[in-house]
Image (spheres, rainbow, N blue to C red):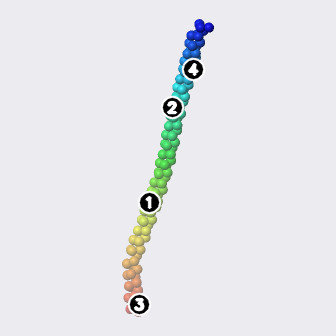
Amino acid sequence: VVADGPDLGAECIRNEENYLSAEHVHLEHTLRCLEQNRASHATSCELSWHARLGCLRLIASEAKEAHRSEMQELQQRQKSSRQAIAAHEERWPRMEIAQTELRHQSLEN
């Protein structure tokens, strides 16, 4: 019985070493999975951020285009208004001359 004692102790140590080795492999695998998940999540977050940034750029571009169109329309209205004012101012002296002539003619008659 005494001879079996050291063999059982050695077997127990081997079993413990095997268990610890398997646990070590399992923990390394778990760590790699966590690192991959973290990298995957970081990539996912980065892609999501780029997508949001792209949307914001598109919205800004559309807003800029709308503003540019509005400014062009306002400039066209200003130009039309200036032309109408200039045409009116050009006619105004002629109308005053015509009115003055009509007054003179009515006074003469």
Q: Secondary structure at mark 3?
A: helix
Which residue is painted at 51% across and 31% down in the image?
35
State which mark lies toward you, 4 or 3: 4
Chain-order first, disc 4 or disc 1: 4
Q: How far across and down, in percent of the image, does residue 50 sit?
A: 49, 42
Mark 2 in CB contact with mark 1 (< 8 angstroms)? no
Mark 2 to mark 4 CA distance (whole Å): 24 Å
Mark 3 in CB contact with mark 2 (< 8 angstroms)? no
Which residue is painted at 39% across and 88% down in the image?
103
Q: How far across and down, in percent of the image, does residue 75 sit?
A: 43, 62
Mark 4 to mark 1 CA distance (whole Å): 76 Å
Which of the labelled discs sits on residue 43, or is there none? none
Which of the labelled discs sits on residue 35, or is there none? 2
Q: Is residue 25 visible?
A: no
Chain-order first, disc 4 or disc 3: 4
Q: How far across and down, in percent of the image, does residue 25 sit?
A: 54, 23
How many labels were placed on the picture? 4
Amino acid tagged 3: Ser
Q: How far across and down, in percent of the image, does residue 68 sit?
A: 45, 56
Comparing 18 with 50, the one in front is 18
Chain-order first, disc 3 or disc 2: 2
Q: Which residue is mark 1?
A: 71
**76 shown above or below 12:** below
